[in-house]
Each structure stands twice: as C-alpha cells, then as structure tokens.
Image (spheres, rainbow, N blue to C red):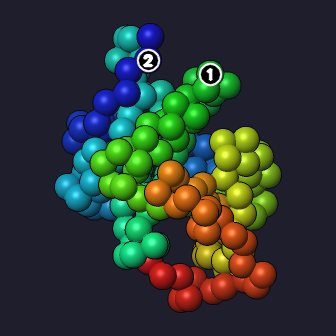
Amino acid sequence: MTTLRQFRMDDLLKFNNINLDVLTETYNMPFYMSYMARWPEAFTVAESANGHLMGYMLGKAEGEGKLWHGHVSAVTVSPLFRRLGLARTLMDDLEDMCKDQYNAYFVDLFVRASNSLAIDMYTKFGYCIYRRVLGYYSGDDPEDAFDMRKALPRDVKKESMIPLDHPVRPEDLEW
C-alpha cells in the first residue's frame, strides 16, 4: 500500500535514492526547506507500507490574475518504484490541490526538451507544450526547456494552453 503525506524535515535525510536519476533536478537543502515552509501542502511524498520513500512532488502556487497557477518544481519516483503509476498519483494530487485549495487556472512544469520519456508521460496526463524556453537549464551542457501546461476547470476556455508561436528566454518568464 502506498500513502501520500506531507514531506517532513527528516525526509531530507532519506530521499537520496529518489534523486539519483540523472534526469532528476536536485536542489540544495535551503531550497527544499523553503518549500516546506511556504507550500507544505504541495510538498508531498509517496511512502511504502514499510516506510520507504518511493517518490515525491515539489509544488507551489504562483502568479496573478489569469496567470494564477500551480507549478510542479519537481516530481520524481525512485527507480525501484517506477511503472506503478506513482507519477500520475502525485500529479493528480497536486492538480486536485490546485483546483480545490488554490483555485488556479492551470498547472505548469518545465521539462528538458531532450527528455522525450517525460514529455510523452506529461502529454498522456493531459499537458501540452505551451512554449520553448531557450537555455533554461544552465551548466556544462545548457539545454532548452518546454513549458508544459494543463488547464484546470477555472480556465473554462483553456486559454492557458494556447501555445506561443515563438520561443522565450528565461528572463522573459513571468514567474
């Protein structure tokens, strides 16, 4: 049995097995702690019956007006627990929270343009590519990102999902 619960401070010492995937973005401890302090309800972990961490969702709410939305900063599942539907469960949980608690217009996320497995998965979850963000991922091997979005019921006309016809730079992002 899998349980979803809020991420706890001591989980920071137990989630390395989840972050070992090369496509998982990892952050410093203050970053994770800031999410626990500001959006604790959107920082969730999937835990097995024997207490092993299986995956987590790092989410938040941001924006103004029709750009008020939920954002997936990270969703990742340990290689030991993949192909069980946990990513969908974590995404559904955040989407429900964005509808019911935040009353958001949409949920968005950024994904490496080369990560076709993740892009396919998010597309199956109802997300579409909204825009390309040039050079979003920096470092030794800079890479573009796709900003993918899924409209929520508040966005009746699904305006948040109408793709832009041109790429943007990171400094052009609203949030």
Q: Which mark is residue 42?
A: none
Say which residue label 1 marks.
84
Residue shown at 42%/28% (left/top)?
46
Q: Looking at the figure, which quarter contains the C terminus? A: bottom left
- Left or right, residue 139 beside residue 41: right
Image location (x, y in percent) of residue 143: 71, 72
Q: Is the residue 21 above or below the residue 107 in the image?
A: above
Q: Which amino acid does label 1 sit on?
A: Leu
The reply to whether discs 1 and 2 touch (Cβ–Cβ < 8 Å) is yes
Looking at the figure, which quarter contains the N terminus?
Answer: top left
- Which residue: 63% across, 86% down? 169
Q: Which of 2 and 101 is in front in this view?
A: 101
The residue depicted at 37 percent of the width and 76 percent of the height is 64
The front one of 156 and 70 is 156
Disc 1 element: loop
Q: Where is residue 149 in the image (x, y as percent from the top left)?
A: 61, 60
127 or 42, which lies in front?
A: 127
Q: Residues within 10 Å of mark 2 (few under 14, many from 20)?
A: some
Does residue 106 appear left or right of residue 129 in this picture? left
Which is more N-terminal, label 2 or label 1?
Answer: 2
Question: Circle 2 is placed at which residue position?
Answer: 2
Looking at numbered disc 2 in the image, what kind of residue is underneath it? Thr
The residue located at (33%, 54%) in the rendering is 102
Q: Is residue 18 at all visible to an observer of this figure?
A: no
Residue 6 rendering spot, x and y as whole percentages: 28, 36
Give me the C-alpha separation between circle 1 and circle 2: 10 Å
Crowd band around label 1 with a 10 angstrom C-alpha radius: few (<14), some (14–19), many (20+): few
Q: Can residue 1 be seen in this view?
A: yes
Image quadrant where residue 129 sits: bottom right
Q: Where is residue 67? Give x, y as percent.
A: 46, 73
- Residue 91 lies left or right of residue 142; in this view the side is left
Q: Relative to residue 40, is residue 92 drawn left or right?
A: right
